[in-house]
Amino acid sequence: MSLKVYELAAADPAIRFSPHCWRTRMAIAHKGLEVDYLPWRFTEKERIQASGQGLVPVLVDGEAWVADSGTIADHLDRRYPDRPLFACPQSRAHARFLETWVSRVLHPQILRQIIGDLFTLIDAGDKAYFRESREKRFGTTLEALSEGADAALPALKATLDPLRATLEAQPFFGGEASSYADYAVFGAFQWARVSSPKELLDAGDPITAWRERMLDAFDGEARAMPARG
């Protein structure tokens, strides 16, 4: 078995911060698979052209090139059925909702909180691409996006209420044990942890306790990546 994953790297190639890549890394740890994680940067699209697109994570499994964290999760469960990420089709459907909600609702709010620190983290060769692409996506400058971040923090915490209520009732989004639903959400908080010293959660928040459990999971796979600051 020869598995490789291309992951988004910072100026320091050992620092991996992408929320989507962390979904995949946690899914692979869940499976107990051995993988060679390769650093990749925004402007190195030719290195993953065999995947048919230009974003990471990209899994290389023998002759197969698989892009997109959700698609990679599906591939892993088909190819390596032990330790399933999805207990049943219904759990896959629920995880798909969480993936979409996190990407469309949670990520933009977290990005506003961390974008200034994130911009200093990425490689110098990526900065022009990052600025142009994100400013086009959000219709404003990076500076305007980050302006008022402190004032916007209460709104972010309110957005997290459904997650908080769920974790008051059970230890993981997967129930009694973590599943891909947890990894889909955790990627967002690991992104913030690695990219910025700003703390987005309160000490007594059930999400904080869950995040600690996720950081400790799989022999501390996620905690081994240093927090910013």
Image (cartoon, rainbow, N blue to C red):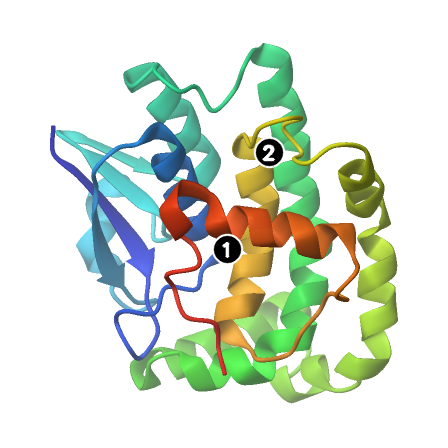
Residue beneath the point at 58% across and 12% down: 89
Residue at label 2? 181
Question: Who is closer to the viewer here, 14 or 138?
Answer: 14
**What percent of the width, then of the height, locates residue 7?**
32, 56
Residue at label 1? 19
Q: Nearer the viewer, mark 1 or mark 2?
A: 2
- Identity, as a three-letter code, of the amino acid under mark 1: Pro
Q: Quadrant of residue 110?
A: bottom right
Q: Quadrant of residue 178?
A: top right
Q: Is 17 above or below relative to 150?
A: above
Distance from disc 1 to disc 2, alpha carbons, whole Å, reads 13 Å
Does residue 46 appear anywhere in the picture?
A: yes
- Identity, as a three-letter code, of the amino acid under mark 2: Ala
Question: Who is closer to the viewer here, 179 or 20?
Answer: 179
Q: Is 113 above or below relative to 147?
A: above
**What percent of the width, then of the height, locates residue 116?**
58, 84
| Pointers 1 and 2 in contact (C-beta within 8 Å) | no
Does residue 20 appear anywhere in the picture?
A: no
Residue beneath the point at 76% across and 80% down: 149
**What percent of the width, then of the height, locates residue 169?**
81, 33
**Could you tell me which secondary element the residue under label 1 belongs to?**
helix
